Image (tube, rainbow, N blue to C red):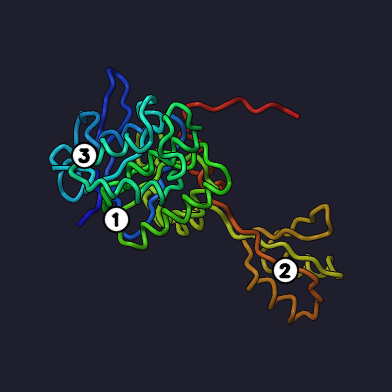
Amino acid sequence: MTSIAVHDLSKDYGRVRAVDSLTFTVEPGRVTGFLGPNGAGKSTTMRLMLGLDRPTAGTATIGGRPYAGIAEPLHHVGALLDAGAAHGSRTARSHLRALAASNRIPDGRVGEVLERTGLASVAGRRIRTFSLGMRQRLGIAAALLGDPRVLLLDEPSNGLDPEGIIWIRELLRGLAREGRTVLVSSHLMSETASFADHLVVLGRGRLLADTPMKEFIDARIKPRVRVRTTEGERLRALLHDRGYVPVPADDGRLIVDGARVEDVGPLAADAGIPILELAAEEATLEQAYLDLTATATQFAATRQEA
């Protein structure tokens, strides 16, 4: 198995507990989104997984072993934590060749990952001339170098242009379809919703959620429909009788919280009320995330009154 297993993991920095008794598993064959407000402990947890920090208590293993115990780790685990870590005076190709040599990866693999990440045409340029998006691509190329079964990526969409964002989305999905274990930390809710199958959410170092994406959203956000009709008063009265509280919108529609299309449609049809529009208002990951983390945000700006 190539799962990542975190068990009762804690990390203290002096009197500050950055990670607090975390237990969760990242399974292969799906993309797991790793979410949480600033200061929630996501980056610290990933560093603990990769042996870059020592835990105060608990364990983090990959395929049943701590990262430090994995020989030639690039063959097993690919990671991107800091896109600016590569030496700026090296070229992209020389950076990857050095990594390959240190883990006995065939030199031909360097060309393959440069092609896959769209960097082949700039492989001879020095890294210090790269934009943030190009550095991100280079970091992803390094993570893919050993064809690993496990990938840990911290904010991989950061700095990418629209084409790059679409590319990383498809890349992550493809890696999961190949049966790899993929953990992706991100602050971009819309992007996470586009590629993640499962979510692990932290708040102030503690585990807040470990659940499939759809279940996470459905558990926190009630269904809602919008409906437009030529007989608004009749429909409102009918919905009231069924326990709903329809709210008129500025555009003449009714917004019905707690209702689904299959609830409202047959009800109106049985009463002979013509429906001009009936649609579900889909709940978003951002709404569910903000609802969950409202009391777990360490750094928040004060809202200004209008």
Q: Nearer the viewer, residue 180 or 86?
A: 86
The residue tagged 1 is 27
Q: Nearer the viewer, residue 236 or 2?
A: 2
Which mark identifies residue 278?
Answer: 2
Residue in view at x 62 percent, y 67 percent: 260
Residue 282 figure quarter: bottom right
Q: Tag 3's secondary structure? A: helix
Q: Residues within 10 Å of mark 2 (few under 14, many from 20)?
A: some
The residue tagged 3 is 101
Q: Nearer the viewer, residue 105 or 49?
A: 105
What separation in Å lies between label 1 and label 2 (alpha carbons)? 39 Å
| CB under 8 Å between discs 2 and 3 | no
Quadrant for the N terminus, please: bottom left
Question: Looking at numbered disc 2 in the image, what kind of residue is underneath it?
Answer: Leu
Residue 305 figure quarter: top right
Q: Tag 2's secondary structure? A: strand
Question: Looking at numbered disc 3 in the image, what kind of residue is underneath it?
Answer: Ala
> In the rendering, at what x and y percent does residue 109 appear?
29, 49
Question: Looking at numbered disc 1 in the image, what kind of residue is underneath it?
Answer: Glu
